[in-house]
Amino acid sequence: MISPTAVERFDLVVLGSGEAGKYLAWAFGKQGKRVAMIERRYIGGSCPNIACLPSKNIIHSAKVASYFSRSKEFGLEIEGYRVDMATVRERKRRMVADLVEVHRKNFEASRVEVILGSGAFVAEKTIEVSLNDGGTRTLTGDNIVISVGTKASIRDIPGLHDANPMTHVEALELDIVPPHLMILGGGFIGLEFAQAMQRFGSEVTLFDRNDRLLHNEDEDISAALLQLMEDEGVRVITDARITGVRGRSGEALTIDCVKNGYECSTEGTHLLVAAGRSPNTAGIGLEKTGVTLRPDGYIVVNERLQTSAPGIWAVGECAGSPKFTHAAFDDFRVVRDNMISHNHATTGRQMPRCLFTDPEVAHIGLSETEAKANGTPYRLFTIPMSSDLRTRTLSETRGFMKALVGLDNDEIRGFTVFGVGGGEIMSAVQIAMLGRLPYTALRDAVLAHPTLTEGLVALFSATPSLVMHDHPG
């Protein structure tokens, strides 16, 4: 039985300092509310510490390394170079330290109390925190926000756990170039690391259990990424069923798999697992709150991000939101508005995505795969990236752009780019889509020359093809 006098009362208690949670804490703290932020380890959550920004920092170092390997193409004579991974890591660590300090100042300025420890519910809207420096505190709040995120999934494959594989967290702390890095998973994390580590000098083998890379994307994107990986020297094994792992990552290990009915084995030195994510909802006492979980452990929420327990909200990846920081930031806006009696829902929001390989893959709106599944007809505009003249000045002509435009009006329904600066180009199209501009507005725009975004004039000036699909069923 918890003594009422031992329970500290707050207007808002946030469990986990990820993107949505920290912005909620700052917003209400600045309004004079009493706010507590419970964080187990990473101030500011995964994005600035162990995920988005650190990985892009490492990827940029790999891009610089790729320029050294192409130096003669640019008229530079460089007789050999060496990658110092300890220095690459130190550059990343300096950035992270700076970002954490920014977060600390934001918490201080908003008068949010940051409590370092592991929190678990002990009753409805009541959380007990095991403090990192010893002792416990018990908190309750008028509103509770669960923002605990996800972690890398380690599948139940014989020998995999014993091999002590890396996840992206450990991979970002490497201080050596792995002689032979093996990667399980051909999604965003796997592809970004595969290219980066190959550019640093690793031999890389990537295994994917699906029949193509990024299997949820259009087939032309999957094919283009496979060609990119192979051109850069990454060995890709798709349709691979891993049957066992022998040895230990960081020393020597062997991966056994079956492909097309044939058994094969691959030897390497390091193993990175990037084969999906699991929510951090186990062991935090949700069974004592009335919060409902899906069979896969994600928290059930409505379109306002309310859980099944009054006064308890869930945001970000643990609530099943798209696994992007920008999705979590929008979750913050949804909950903030609903807490102050504004009706704000997650339904109908545009959700861009960007893979930070080099070149990038970026997408917004309807894809060709989705249009085919839905039986949606469209006009397809497409050009190679070489038609965007800026790419020729950069010697970065690989890839293509494509856009889906409706038949009954000129609105842009979807856009995909595989090319240099893809994320920035995609954002320009997204803004046009948000404004419901016809594609002709971009076609007829006077855009600066030579810029990558200017390629949109060429794209929407191309002759479209008409794509008709039978309705499913």
Image (cartoon, rainbow, N blue to C red):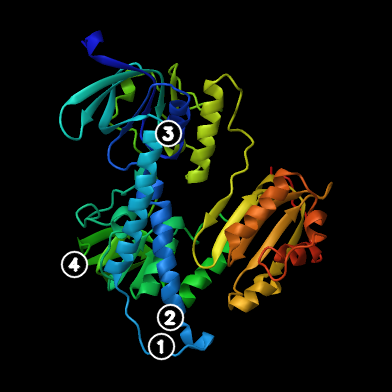
For the N terminus, give its image quadrant.
Answer: top left
SS at mark 2? Answer: helix
Distance from disc 4 to disc 1, alpha carbons, whole Å, reads 33 Å
Residue at 39%, 51% in the rendered image? 51
Rendered image quadrant of residue 293: top left
Label located before the other in sequence (3 or 2)? 3
**Direction from residue 272 to residue 159 in the image, left or right:** left
Q: Which residue is mark 2?
A: 68
Q: Are marks 2 and 1 in contact (CB under 8 Å)?
A: yes
Label located before the other in sequence (4 or 1)? 1
Tell me the kind of residue under disc 1. Ile
Residue at 80%, 65% in the rendered image? 461
Label located before the other in sequence (2 or 4)? 2
Residue at 33%, 52% in the rendered image? 97
Distance from disc 2 to disc 1, alpha carbons, whole Å, reads 7 Å
Q: Are marks 1 and 3 in contact (CB under 8 Å)?
A: no
Tell me the kind of residue under disc 4. Glu
SS at mark 3? Answer: helix
Tell me the kind of residue under disc 2. Phe
Q: Position of residue 384 (x, y in %)?
A: 68, 71
Q: Which residue is mark 4?
A: 251
Q: Are marks 3 and 4 in contact (CB under 8 Å)?
A: no
Up/down of 354 relative to 109, above or below: below
Q: Which residue is mark 3?
A: 21
Up/down of 412 relative to 66, above or below: above
Is residue 196 in view from this perspective? Answer: yes
Q: Which residue is mark 1?
A: 78
Is residue 257 in view from this perspective? Answer: no
